[in-house]
Amino acid sequence: MCGIVGYIGNKDAVPILLKGLQRLEYRGYDSAGISVIGNDGIQIVKQAGKVSALAKAVDDSPVSGSVGIAHTRWATHGEPNDTNAHPHSDDDGTFSLVHNGIIENHASLRTYLQEQGVTFGTDTDTEVLVQLIAYLYKKDGISFEQAVQSALREVVGAYGIAVTCREEPDTIIIARLGSPLVLGIGDDEYFIASDASPIVEYTRKVVYLDEGEMVCIRPDGYEVKHIQDDTVLSKEVQDIDLSVEQIEKGNFPHFMVKEIHEQAHTIPDTLRGRLLADEGTAHLGGIEDWIPRFESAHRIYITACGTSWHAGLIGKYLIEEYANIPVHVEYASEFRYRRSIVDKDTLVLAISQSGETADTLAAVKKAKEKGALTVGICNVVGSSIARETECGIYTHAGPEIGVASTKAFTAQVTVLYMLALRLGKIAGMSAIEGRTLAKALTDIGKNAEQILDSSAEIEKVAWEYRDAENFLYLGRGLNFPVALEGALKLKEISYIHAEGYPAAEMKHGPIALIDEKMPVVFLAPHDMTFEKVLSNISEVKARKGMIITLTDKKTKDLSDLSDHLIVVPTSHPRIFPILATIPLQLLAYHLAVIRGCNVDQPRNLAKSVTVE
Ligand code: G6P
């Protein structure tokens, strides 16, 4: 969701900025723009649409300069059109600014500025901020840096910003409150971005901004300070653990399918060095110091959004089964605003691939205020949620670029298996039970490979349902969240309406939808729920629905009832959900490709939702 790129140094900023915007396309956006300071002052090119169209526009009317900022916008206030695209400027073009986030008091600031004679050219909250900076700069005769700082002190809301000034052309100022920014440090040049992906090909040395910090950057150095109290801060320079190959498609046509295929090694990567298969438990370095608080906890809340929330539901089933602690799973957007029963005896697990989701971050802050121990399960190292939580477990799935989460989801589930084993040990889970599950976890990598080899078969199934307008996904127990995730994946990328339900709930509503045009995907492993699911399959068959069944063993009863049977290899009934997820991802992927959809950047969606 919205991306910022910036460059200051001795090279032409334009190609660096455009390439950086391409790297950030995965976040989701609807317009893009660039501004550089050259001999003719600030030059801005911006428009609705893709970065490739912006690059073409820059080719048609070239701009150049060695200082610049750029942006991909995901509209919140004001339509996604050319005018509302960033960068924004003040009345006379002294400043140029790009912004991620929302200025909540934009309406009152706009009224105040209008009363002072400022005229506005756009509907955006962002223009209010740049106009405020310009107003203070001119009225008080202060420096660029002082004007930005004074304006930020007036602002309520969330922001990551980068600003340039025509009168101080060798400076970029960046600031963060609620929206991440990374400063890349090169040799007499600096790179700015919302995340490390645009920076990694130039330098591995970065500084992550913390909340409430601003940085004044010039080609020969930078200074970080606190926006409110003016303290100058000395920040740790960190190494980015990311390679260019990880953020490129390689031989795959889309990031999503690359990431689906990566699961054969990302799941083992998540387990590596943590799963103690012989002991039937796990050693989770990021939480071990806090284990006494885990031991004394009376309840657990899992809070998350989207796909991560589905992982949380699987976590609930696993932790309650193995560790015998009550677990509540709540959407972060609900958790943050209601009176949930959270106190010092509560653990709050926040699950987030990006580690930047605004609602999940707010939920963590609320849980901390109430005295709970907060635990982050994040994929992005150094992300806001990872840093805000007291302790945590990284999922180590590597960068996920496709908007629809795939490998990050299975990595989250993998962490939750290990957490259930770790907490199970505290709760007295038997060693044999622990070892059996742990052994099955170690087999997931090779099981996943086998499933991935059947991608062409799943593609054939997808061709048969390419014209379907609805899908139903049904599962019981641990497989109910998988049904939800299968349905979410399909709707996100193929725009086919899909719903996930606990299989037995079908009779309380969805059964009315079943006719010969309704494909129903069943999750039917041969576990304790099998007979019940088989009955549900018969109920659909009796109403002429089309049946796609995922199971762990080909049996005659299933073959007779199903139009398509997809078998995943598994050695343990509790492992079926994670493995069954992979064919569902492939089904959604192939259907979306067949229907001509943009699978990596589905319409209206953003990878990381940094606004409410
Ligand atoms: C967005 C993404 C989803 C993701 C959700 C939560 O909606 O499109 O794929 O599941 O945010 O994101 P998080 O980074 O917190 O897991």
Image (cartoon, helix red, strand yellow):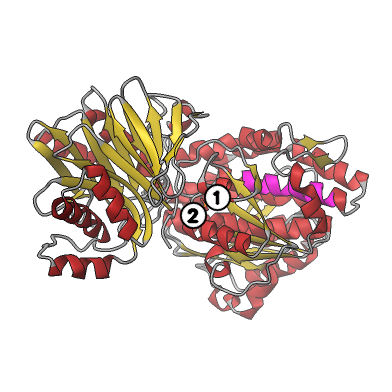
Give whichever of 253, 216 is nearer the camera.
216
The span picked out in magenta is 411-424
The spot of residue 547 in percent (x, y) is 61, 61
Left or right position of 234 against 166: right
User: Which residue position is annotated with label 1?
Assistant: 385
Residue at (87%, 41%) from the top-left corner?
A: 435
- Left or right: 320 in relation to 541: right
Q: CA distance from mark 2 to mark 1?
A: 8 Å
The dominant secondary structure in magenta is helix
Residue under label 2 = 357
- Mark 2 close to ligand 1, CB under 8 Å: yes
Residue type, numbered disc 2: Thr
Q: Residues within 10 Å of mark 1 (few under 14, many from 20)?
A: many
Q: Secondary structure at mark 2?
A: loop
Work out whether residue 564 can be spotted. yes
Is residue 421 on the magenta stretch? Answer: yes
Indicate which label's residue lies in the foreground, 2 or 1: 1
Type of residue at label 1?
Ile
